[in-house]
């Protein structure tokens, strides 16, 4: 979908347009297409957390949990105090059956969730953890 010749010559405005397209595709549940766009723009502008978040979310929605962990980690590196990427990494780890890593990520989310935006989600995830087969 995305021309391989697209490179460093893109302006910030053009990158923003690509991001908007990727986000629109994501909202339309065209996750494979949004994944391709976000993957490309993260390579062009690797310090933009929203680009990595779009990439990670696109992968996670396709149940590519292992692959989603790298972009979630990049979100953490860029904005370490943001609880959101820790939470979604915990979801990925839990889906992969890596409970110890999921617990660490969820704890990191909890420790950074100063405004309690993730409090209910954290509780629900912990409950799902404890339910047999959950």
Image (cartoon, helix red, strand yellow):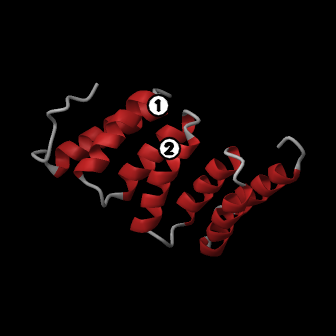
Horizontal relation, residue 33 to residue 106: left or right: left
Q: Please, is residue 49 above or below residue 80 in the view?
A: above
Residue drawn at x 32%, y 34% is: 21
Q: Residue at position x 39%, y 28% from top? A: 33
Residue 31: image tag: 1
In this image, 132 relative to 95: left or right? right
Residue at x-position 31% and y-position 49% = 42
Whether 25 is drawn above or below 53: the answer is above
For label 2, the residue is 67
Can I make out residue 83 in this image?
Answer: yes
Q: Secondary structure at mark 1?
A: helix
Circle 2 SS class: helix
Task: From the image, state whether disc 2 or disc 1 is nearer to you.
Answer: 2
- Residue 83 pos. (x, y %): 57, 65
- Residue 124 percent across, percent down from the top left: 78, 53
Q: For the view shown, which residue lies furthest in the left direction?
A: 9
Q: Quadrant of the N terminus?
A: top left
Residue 77 rendering spot, x and y as whole percentages: 42, 67
* Upstream in sequence: badge 2 or badge 1: 1
Is disc 1 surrounded by few (<14), some (14 to 19) or many (20+) residues within 10 Å? many
Q: Is residue 19 left or right of residue 120?
A: left
Q: Quadrant location of residue 105?
A: bottom right
Q: Is residue 11 above or below residue 48?
A: above
């Amino acid at each position: 979908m995305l021309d391989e010749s697209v490179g460093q010559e893109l302006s910030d405005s053009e990158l923003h347009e690509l991001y908007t397209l990727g986000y629109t595709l994501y909202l339309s549940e065209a996750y494979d297409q949004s994944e391709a766009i976000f993957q490309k723009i993260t390579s062009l502008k690797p310090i933009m957390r929203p680009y990595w978040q779009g990439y990670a979310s696109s992968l996670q929605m396709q149940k590519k949990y292992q692959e989603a962990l790298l972009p979630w980690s990049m979100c953490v590196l860029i904005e370490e105090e943001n609880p959101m990427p820790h939470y979604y990494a915990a979801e990925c780890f839990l889906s992969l059956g890596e409970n110890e890593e999921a617990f660490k990520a969820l704890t990191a989310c909890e420790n950074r969730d100063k405004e309690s935006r993730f409090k209910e989600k954290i509780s629900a995830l912990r409950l799902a953890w404890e339910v047999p087969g959950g």
